[in-house]
Amino acid sequence: MASTTFHIRNAGSSPNDADFIVAAFDSTIPYLESTGNSGQWGTQLFSEKDGFIQSARDDIEKSETFRQTGQGERIRTFIAQVHDTEYSDSEDGLVRCVDDEGKAFLSVGAITVRDDEFSEHILVNEDLKPHAEQAKEAGGFLFIDVLITDHRVGQRRRGAGGALVEKAKEHAREQGKRAVYIDCWTGGTGKLVPYYENFGFKVIQAFEVKRKDGSVWPGKLMRVDILTE
């Protein structure tokens, strides 16, 4: 089977990008339930969570502001899409872009990275604080904050996550960063850690997050070093 070619673009170049990201998050909930991994994100649809839709819109606006001006919150969001040879005028709820040549591209995944910044849940975790401090002292880094693919598109999403991770590494290299960090859930079937190890990431610290309901979210912080010229 031939590998899929993914076209990766800046989020914000389509007015529907925020809606796509919300829908992609929603699509993971039934999938995680069906595979015994509902402990990762729970069972409530993201679109039903207070403020999530607006947050998705705000993040894309921040990404575009930082890309264009270098100001504001230091985040970048990228969208993975595939050439949609199955495109028709039917209303299927999927998000597409049409280029100047009339070719349709279907959005299948998204990634958000932070430039020299970690997410708040990393910074407040006592087990992870030393690693966050070490990363800042060692030089530039990226933190993968969000990585999502749309389960509604079926097999057309296969490989999109890996393509987006490689995009993050490429972006880090272009920016002269020394490392890329990501944290992942280690519960359920436990497949996420080996998945990221396939892209060169190594575990540097296990940690736990206590949820409001008293349950524990187990995770691991991982890092891949970036060779810069």
Image (cartoon, rainbow, N blue to C red):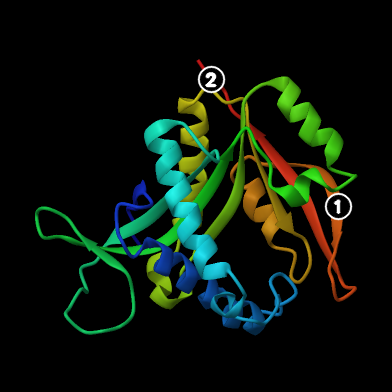
**Quarter occupied by residue 49:** bottom right
Neighbour class for label 1 at 10 Å: few (<14), some, many (≥20)? some
User: Is residue 12 depicted above or below 93 in this figure?
Assistant: above
Residue at figure coordinates x 49%, y 70% from the top left: 22
Image quarter in which the N terminus is found: bottom left
**Quarter occupied by residue 32:** bottom right
Q: Which residue is mark 2?
A: 228
Q: Which residue is mark 1?
A: 207
Tell which of 99 and 170 is nearer to you.
99
Q: Are marks 2 and 1 in contact (CB under 8 Å)?
A: no
Residue at figure coordinates x 39%, y 74% from the top left: 153
Q: Amino acid at mark 2?
A: Thr
Q: Amino acid at mark 1?
A: Phe
Tell me where residue 138 appears, x and y as whole percent. Answer: 72, 21
Ranked by sequence position, the earlier of labels 2 and 1 is: 1
Tell me where residue 42 appears, x and y as whole percent. Answer: 70, 77
Tell me where residue 99 appears, x and y as whole percent. Answer: 16, 55
Q: Is residue 3 visible?
A: no
Q: CA distance from mark 2 to mark 1?
A: 30 Å
User: Is residue 41 depicted above or below 72 in this figure?
Assistant: below
**Under tag 2, what secondary structure?**
loop
Query: Residue most toward the left?
Result: 101
